[in-house]
Image (spheres, rainbow, N blue to C red):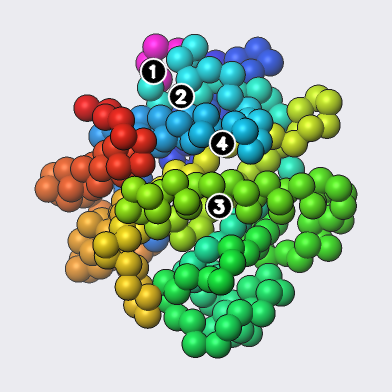
């Protein structure tokens, strides 16, 4: 199969008219891919995405053709997808303050032009989820854009739909996760167009690589939050003499095992299922 795109932790292949999206067990911390894989991470992210696509199918259609009709060597961690015309916008919804949303709030009291109450801090819940789109930079970092700029890129009609659907997906996901003791602080979605011009959800959805997941029991606004998936990795790597530039450090077995357990726990908590 022809490799069409290789990301930090995922690869995209072409199979005739279809695409096969393959999630590896690679993991990144501070944007650096580490040399040691986390066993089953690719399977957890793929199965979680497939589960969400089903949960969300009444909100928006998606690019999935099959989670099982994939080459044997990638069984469980690949998705056969329709090839879409991808829209050049990262659609982010934020329900809590973290990352670039927090930075913007601290500088201006706003995120994506929305004025927020004074006195919020790191990890605070927002009064309402906010749509904070960015460009998709080929290299370097994605830049925040306004709704008018989104409309300039995709047209006013599609832009309005992206905002509405992004917030609807976030609200549905956050509500479901909340009932299972998990906070989804924010999420990044990608959309594309089918041949008939309809907008569908693409890529991965509501995975820990595209979203911030926190345990509700550990959520405490006013300080950095513990990431449900990578906190062991971050805490361990923070104690090393490592400048956060490649190459990253080899992960010791106990940290691999603890991190793998967190991914499996996230999956079973959210879905009620068990990946072994
Ligand atoms: C997704 C990406 C990955 C690296 C392109 N259904 C689709 N149709 C057309 N293009 C894409 C999709 Cl999902 C598409 N990406 C992101 C995924 C590895 C980059 F698995 N790029």
**Above or below 56: residue 31:** below
Disc 1 crowd rating (10 Å Cα; few below 14, some 14-19, many 20+) is some
Q: Are marks 3 and 2 in contact (CB under 8 Å)?
A: no
Q: Are marks 1 and 2 in contact (CB under 8 Å)?
A: yes
Mark drawn on residue 78: 2
Q: From the viewer's perspective, tell me whether residue 38 is left or right of residue 201.
A: left
Mark drawn on residue 56: 4
| Residue situated furthest left in the rendering | 254
Q: Quadrant of the C terminus?
A: top left
Going 65% across and 12% down the picture, which residue do you hit? 16
Determine the CA span between mark 1 and mark 4: 23 Å
Q: Which element carries disc 1, helix, strand or loop?
A: loop
| Whole-percent x, y for residue 140 in the image | 59, 59
Count of residue discs? 4
Determine the CA span between mark 1 and mark 3: 31 Å
Instruction: Please tell me in which quadrant of the rendered image residue 207 appears.
Output: top left
Nearer to me, 241 or 254: 254
Going 18% across and 48% down the picture, which residue do you hit? 258
Q: Are marks 1 and 3 in contact (CB under 8 Å)?
A: no
Going 33% across and 38% down the picture, which residue do you hit? 267
Disc 3 crowd rating (10 Å Cα; few below 14, some 14-19, many 20+) is some
Which is closer to the viewer, label 3 or label 2? 3
Magenta region, main secondary structure? helix
Determine the CA span between mark 2 and mark 4: 19 Å
**Above or below 204: residue 239:** below
């Amino acid at each position: 199969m022809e490799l069409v795109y290789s990301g930090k932790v995922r690869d995209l292949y072409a199979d005739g008219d279809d695409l096969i999206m393959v999630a590896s067990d690679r993991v990144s911390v501070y944007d650096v891919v580490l040399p040691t894989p986390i066993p089953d991470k690719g399977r957890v992210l793929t199965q979680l995405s497939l589960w969400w696509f089903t949960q969300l199918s009444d909100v928006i259609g998606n690019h999935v053709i099959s989670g099982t009709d994939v080459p044997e060597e990638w069984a469980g961690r690949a998705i056969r997808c329709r090839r879409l015309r991808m829209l050049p916008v990262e659609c982010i919804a934020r329900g809590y303050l973290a990352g670039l949303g927090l930075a913007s709030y601290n500088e201006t009291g706003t995120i994506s032009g929305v004025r927020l109450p004074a006195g919020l801090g790191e990890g605070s819940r927002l009064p309402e989820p906010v749509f904070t789109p960015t460009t998709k930079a080929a290299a370097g970092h994605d830049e925040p854009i306004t709704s008018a700029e989104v409309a300039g890129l995709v047209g006013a009609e599609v832009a309005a739909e992206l905002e509405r659907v992004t917030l609807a997906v976030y609200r549905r996901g956050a509500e479901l996760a909340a009932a299972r003791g998990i906070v989804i602080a924010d999420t990044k979605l990608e959309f594309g167009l089918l041949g008939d011009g309809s907008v569908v959800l693409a890529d991965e959805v509501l995975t820990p690589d595209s979203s911030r997941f926190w345990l509700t029991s550990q959520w405490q606004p006013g300080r950095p939050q513990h990431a449900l998936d990578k906190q062991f990795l971050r805490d361990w790597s923070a104690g090393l003499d490592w400048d956060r530039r490649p190459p990253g450090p080899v992960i010791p077995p106990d940290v691999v095992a603890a991190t793998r357990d967190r991914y499996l726990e996230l999956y079973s908590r959210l879905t009620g299922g068990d990946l072994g």
